[in-house]
Image: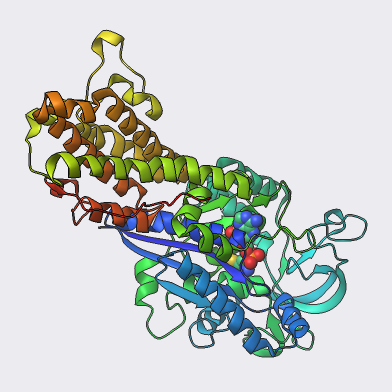
């Protein structure tokens, strides 16, 4: 059994969660659930980023004391995880003095010991929306185009982190594969940054201006700058800096930090440099996802196109939403969400796809075999193989027509399909893994059309039984592959076919039960 540690970004609590936060939660959950399915000891972390000017300003605007304000938004993020059926093992929030502060402080001290923190004067522009210093070239008409707001002009004393020292070490880490950045084009973005050479970065702000944060160890007049505080969450949650660091020893380094492309620089340059400075191992993979747009535009309050995930789940259920975001939205590109596309995918692939298939097969078993299929032996299963088209959707090169092999469904599932599915997850191609499951569903539908068990039952009951047995096995294989994506639906399918586990070896007899439509049709 190997260990697997995956994280989402921690989300700012300046505003309620939106579709984008749901997206990151869902993708990370899919990967975590896949690893649990494989038997890996998995630790999945999410949480909230609660310090800094942006959050303080939002609280002030709402007329609520900061701690109260952040607590209520934090609860909203927890609720989001719960309604989306996210299986996180922990939830860290940066205002947590007991669990988060010690790790952030220990990390700061390590960087200081390495001689990488020094005091200097910062002169420049600060965008509160980004919680980052920006430059002239980031502006349009004097404003930050992402936040439609002029930056603050700042001249102040800060502590700096000697990021420049890590340009070469980072190049090496990427070159020697110690730090993988996926997809490749995002690795190229880091390479360009490294080619330009990294510059030292501000690591604190004066407490008189920003007091909502962690005080710099040994200097109460300065507050840790949000990113140094926030990035530390990935280790503070594991107990780094607290009395019991055993979880940290066990799970660090992270196997995957899932992040949006908006925070690439912080995770591929700042964070690894901080870890190198502290003498800690680097995360294995930074998995960078694209952003989801709505109606062709970036979601924004001003445009009024912010999608509320709670509404969608209320109308369609969590699994449908999880399905759409993980299959129909490309992980590595910017994606698009529209209610129309979502409704069409729901109808086409869930109502008419998964739901119909499961119902159709179980109904036949009920009417022809009183709901029960016994063990039928390999020979009879092999006598009703999949039709020859079954490799097409896997992009496997087919043999010449005369050599085409015909596979029984169990053989196909175990020797071909599952391996392809595992391969897709090994490179974090979540969409491809979902495509494989849905490609298989299509094959199963064609298999019904090929053998027509509803007719066969009149002429050859034995063969009809073997066909329905194979179709049941197929339904369970589908359920297993869908588990990371649609866990509730998947578990429901197991129940419907009367088996208790995802272990193929236990799928020998089936006893189907009546059930409501998995995905009810929408008006
Ligand atoms: O940046 N589409 O927090 P944040 C897809 N606190 N994903 C989206 C998205 C969209 N339109 N919008 C946001 C922060 N996300 C910092 C992170 S980490 C140590 C600190 C997701 O609330 C995406 O994963 O702005 C993005 O990187 C993250 O939310 C940013 O959330």
Locate residue 271: give its quadrant. bottom right
Locate residue 461, reporting x and y percent. Answer: 10, 30
Q: Is residue 15 left or right of residue 448?
A: right
Image point (54%, 87%), residue name: 97
Q: Is the residue 481 above or below the residue 109 in the image?
A: above
Q: Is the residue 67 above or below the residue 480 in the image?
A: below
Along the viewing direction, whichever of 90 and 318 lies nearer the viewer:
318
* Res. 427 in view: no
Which residue is at the far right? 141
The quadrant of the rendering that contains the N terminus is bottom left
Q: Is residue 73 left or right of residue 447?
A: right
Q: Name the colouring of the figure.
A: rainbow
Q: How many numbered circles does the render carry?
A: 0
Q: Is the residue 510 above or below the residue 302 in the image?
A: above
Q: Is residue 177 left or right of residue 65?
A: left
Locate residue 491: give its quadrant. bottom left
Locate residue 248, reporting x and y percent. Answer: 40, 72
Locate residue 39: give its quadrant. bottom left
Image point (73%, 79%), residue name: 58
Q: Is residue 320 left or right of residue 387?
A: right
Along the viewing direction, whichever of 485 and 332 lies nearer the viewer:
485
Along the viewing direction, whichever of 497 and 330 lies nearer the viewer:
497
Along the viewing direction, whichever of 5 and 180 lies nearer the viewer:
5
Locate residue 2, reporting x and y percent. Answer: 29, 58
Locate residue 137, reporting x and y percent. Answer: 85, 53
Q: Within the displayed image, which quadrant is ligand 1 positioned in?
A: bottom right
Which residue is at the far top? 402
Q: Is the residue 9 above or below the residue 389 in the image?
A: below
* Res. 121 in view: yes
Image point (53%, 65%), residue name: 275
């Amino acid at each position: 059994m190997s260990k697997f540690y995956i994280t989402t970004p921690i989300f700012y609590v300046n505003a309620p969660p939106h579709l984008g936060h749901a997206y990151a939660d869902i993708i990370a959950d899919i990967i975590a659930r896949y690893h649990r399915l494989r038997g890996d000891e998995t630790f999945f972390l999410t949480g909230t980023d609660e310090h800094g000017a942006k959050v303080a300003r939002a609280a002030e605007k709402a007329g609520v004391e900061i701690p109260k304000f952040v607590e209520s938004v934090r609860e909203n993020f927890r609720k989001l995880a719960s309604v989306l059926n996210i299986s996180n093992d922990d939830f860290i929030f940066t205002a947590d003095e007991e669990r988060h502060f010690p790790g952030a402080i220990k990390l700061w001290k390590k960087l200081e010991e390495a001689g990488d923190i020094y005091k200097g004067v910062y002169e420049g522009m600060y965008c509160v929306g980004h919680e980052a210093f920006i430059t002239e070239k980031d502006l349009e008409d004097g404003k930050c185009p992402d936040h439609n707001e002029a930056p603050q002009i700042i001249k102040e004393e800060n502590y700096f982190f000697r990021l420049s020292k890590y340009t070469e070490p980072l190049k090496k880490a990427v070159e020697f594969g110690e730090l993988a950045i996926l997809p490749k084009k995002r690795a190229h973005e880091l390479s360009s940054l490294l080619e330009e050479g990294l510059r030292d970065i501000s690591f604190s702000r004066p407490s008189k201006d920003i007091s909502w944060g962690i005080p710099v160890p040994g200097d109460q007049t300065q507050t840790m700058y949000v990113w140094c505080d926030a990035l530390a969450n990935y280790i503070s949650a594991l107990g780094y800096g607290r009395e019991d660091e055993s979880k940290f020893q066990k799970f660090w380094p992270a196997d995957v930090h899932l992040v949006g492309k908006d925070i690439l620089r912080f995770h591929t340059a700042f964070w690894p440099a901080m870890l190198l400075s502290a003498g800690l191992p680097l995360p294995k993979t930074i998995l960078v996802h694209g952003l989801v747009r709505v109606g062709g535009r970036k979601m924004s309050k001003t445009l009024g196109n912010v999608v509320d995930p709670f509404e969608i789940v209320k109308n369609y259920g969590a699994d449908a939403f999880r399905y759409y975001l993980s299959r129909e939205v490309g992980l590595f590109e910017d994606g698009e969400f529209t209610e129309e596309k979502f409704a069409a995918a729901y109808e086409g692939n869930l109502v008419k796809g998964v739901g119909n298939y499961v119902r159709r097969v179980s109904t036949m078993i009920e009417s022809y075999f009183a709901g029960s299929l016994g063990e039928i032996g390999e020979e009879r299963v092999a006598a009703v193989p999949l039709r020859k088209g079954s490799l097409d959707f896997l992009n496997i090169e087919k043999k010449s027509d005369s050599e085409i092999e015909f596979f029984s469904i169990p053989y196909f599932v175990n020797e071909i399909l599952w391996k392809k599915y595992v391969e897709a997850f090994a490179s974090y191609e979540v969409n491809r893994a979902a495509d494989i499951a849905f490609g298989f569903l299509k094959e199963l539908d064609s298999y019904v059309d090929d053998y027509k068990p509803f007719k066969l039952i009149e002429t050859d009951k034995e063969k009809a039984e073997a066909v329905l047995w194979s179709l049941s096995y197929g339904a369970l294989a589908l359920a297993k592959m869908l588990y990371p994506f649609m866990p509730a639906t998947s578990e429901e399918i197991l129940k419907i076919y009367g088996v208790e586990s995802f272990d193929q070896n236990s799928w020998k007899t089936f006893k189907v039960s009546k059930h409501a439509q998995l995905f009810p049709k929408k008006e």
